[in-house]
Amino acid sequence: MSQDATTRTAVVTGASSGIGAATVRRLRAEGFEVLAVARRADRLAALAEETGCSTHVADLTAQADVDALREVVRERFGGDLTALVNNAGGAFGTDTVEGGKVEDWQRMFDVNVLATLRVTQALLPALRAGTGGDVLVMSSTAARIAYEGGGGYTAAKHAESVMAETLRLELAGDPVRVLEVAPGMVRTEEFSLNRTGGDAARADAVYAGVREPLVAEDVADCVAWMLTRPRHVNVDLLVVRPLAQAAQHKVVREQV
């Protein structure tokens, strides 16, 4: 499709659940044409039925899938993209550095760092087109500080955050903003469950006693706000936590 002057378009990765799906819903409510990207076709189909978004099934750790995504963006949006929300990612395992599994670290770097790199490289030409666009990176407060049992995830998120900082420097003078959201404790249906290998009791314990952890819609609200600021306003970094989390290592828990 070709865009008129008022059309805003966005690609959201990791859109099948959690923050990604909430971001698709919020951007659709803001009037964006959205291409939701994820691996799970059934989840994307349900999201499309609910929101009217377009969908594309892809494994962003595979270069061929990312190349195909670039072509889909060209076909659907005429090669002119307003925003790329690099949301795909995840944490796997809570082992110490000494006991960490190399395959878990590799997977975290593949989905958090290299997928963001691949997609950003593929879609930058479309983001430069027209009046310019936005690259938004969904990092984490884990990108700001280390903690025990989080070595692989914090390393990956630090790398993703530094990639955003470097890209901002390299694109200075181009009509492309580089934005970063760093959420703290967010309770979604899958993040902690995936991290604990499907152990529901351990996943629930992460949030035990925490009054009102963030939910996916809170983060999506931040994303929408950042993407809809005037073009001369660049929100370099937005750190967002629940009130009960004063720092990565300081969480208020009530007796349950």
Image (cartoon, rainbow, N blue to C red):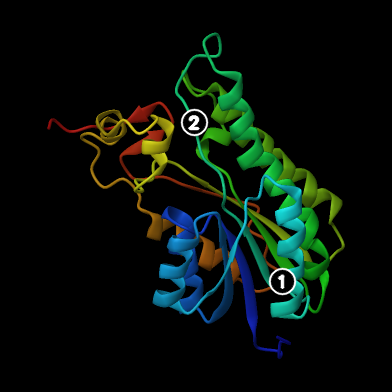
- Between discs 2 and 1, the one toward the N terminus: 1
Direction from residue 133 to residue 21 in the image, left or right: left
- Residue 245 rendering spot, x and y as whole percentages: 36, 37
> Which residue is label 2 attached to?
92
Direction from residue 238 to residue 80 in the image, left or right: right
Residue at 44% x, 41% y: name it: 184
Q: Which mark is residue 1?
A: none
- Residue 172 rendering spot, x and y as whole percentages: 84, 57
Q: Is residue 5 above or below residue 140?
A: below
- Residue 171 rendering spot, x and y as whole percentages: 84, 56
Q: Is residue 39 above or below residue 255?
A: below
Disc 1 marks a residue whose amino acid type is: Val
Q: Quadrant of the C terminus?
A: top left
Q: Is residue 47 above or below residue 91?
A: below
Q: Residues within 10 Å of mark 2 (few under 14, many from 20)?
A: many
Compare residues 81 and 242 and report the one nearer the observer.
81
Identify the element where label 2 is drawn: loop
Q: Is residue 162 above or below residue 172?
A: above
The quarter holding residue 76 reads bottom right
Gap in Å between the C-alphas at discs 2 and 1? 30 Å
- Residue 96 rendering spot, x and y as whole percentages: 49, 14
Disc 2 marks a residue whose amino acid type is: Phe
Q: Residues within 10 Å of mark 1 (few under 14, many from 20)?
A: many
The quarter holding residue 112 reads top right
Residue at 51% x, 72% y: name it: 27
> Which residue is label 1 attached to?
73
Q: Quadrant of the N terminus?
A: bottom right
Residue at 76% x, 80% y: name it: 78
Identify the element where label 1 is drawn: helix
Numbered marks: total: 2
Residue at 36% x, 28% y: name it: 250
Direction from residue 242 to residue 24 in the image, left or right: right
